[in-house]
Amino acid sequence: MSNRNHSYNTDLNTDQSADYTLLVQIGLNSFSYAVAGQGRLLVLKEDVSLVELSQTSESNNILSSEYKKRVVSLPYNGFTFVPVSLFNPEKVADFARFLDVKPDEKVFSQPLDADNQVIYKTDESLVNMVAEKFGINSVVFAPKGWIKLTAANSPSNNDLYINIDGDHAEFLNFRDGKLRFYNTFEFKAADELAYFAMFVAGELQLHPSDITAILSGDIALDNENATSLTRFFGKIELNSMSSLEVPDQTASHDILTLTALSLCGSSEVI
């Protein structure tokens, strides 16, 4: 998770929560959550200790309310995309062998878009925690909402979407409106982030000067991570997309991957 710690609350009436959607983004040591209703962000809380999932608190009261829909993303330890034309639900276990699944990991499968099925693995301890609190059918592939939202906003072939979460960078690119590339890398310094961005550009055979780098997550145009990218790419900008109307005091690009979960359905656990 990021180092941000934002909160926003419209004095949510939990008696009306059955009309709302709960969005939860789980990290290794903390989680963030939001409540959405009528296309608006009603509640936001970031970087909450995982301990709160099992404790009594104001946050826990919100998390325990009944909702029209719950969507929970988990950090994955590995994933693979399978073309829908080749995917057979009865063969998921065979595909999962490419992920080198450990005894303490669980495998999930779900449609990513019209062309791809995603199969991914995550820590069993986190799965059990989420299953007890929210139900296993609430779990989704973490970047699915971001990918779906981007696809719906006419991405250019030369747009390279980058989402920063702490020391992890996710990269996303489309070709003719279809998903071409998604991957994530861990970086320790701004120069390393720039290196991975250039590596991705090379893999996509895109000239850096032609690329627009569209940034979201834990980043600002004047911080060192963004500055390192300006040295290589033709243009950088903050991501202005949002699946929800957010309050003026909240930058939508900061919480894009969380709010975009509102566009998701659930995974199948294998």
Image: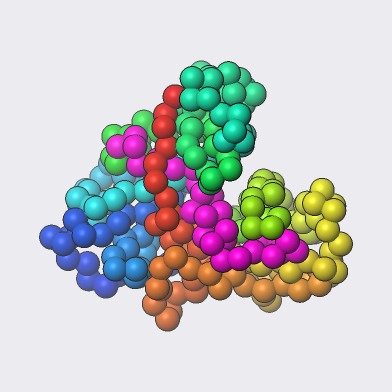
Residue 189 percent coordinates (x, y): 74, 56
Q: Quadrant of residue 131?
A: top left
| Residue depicted at x 42% and y 29% | 269
Whether residue 80 is visible here, answered yes or no, is yes
Residue 142 included in the magenta stretch of the image: yes
Q: Quadrant of residue 220?
A: bottom right
Residue 112 percent coordinates (x, y): 52, 43
Q: Is residue 212 left or right of residue 254?
A: right
Q: Is residue 181 above or below residue 177?
A: above
Q: Is residue 264 above or below residue 254?
A: above
Quadrant occupied by the C terminus: top left
Q: Quadrant of residue 217?
A: bottom right
Residue 114 percent coordinates (x, y): 54, 45
- The magenta segment is 135-162
Residue 81 included in the magenta stretch of the image: no
| Residue depicted at x 47% and y 31% | 108
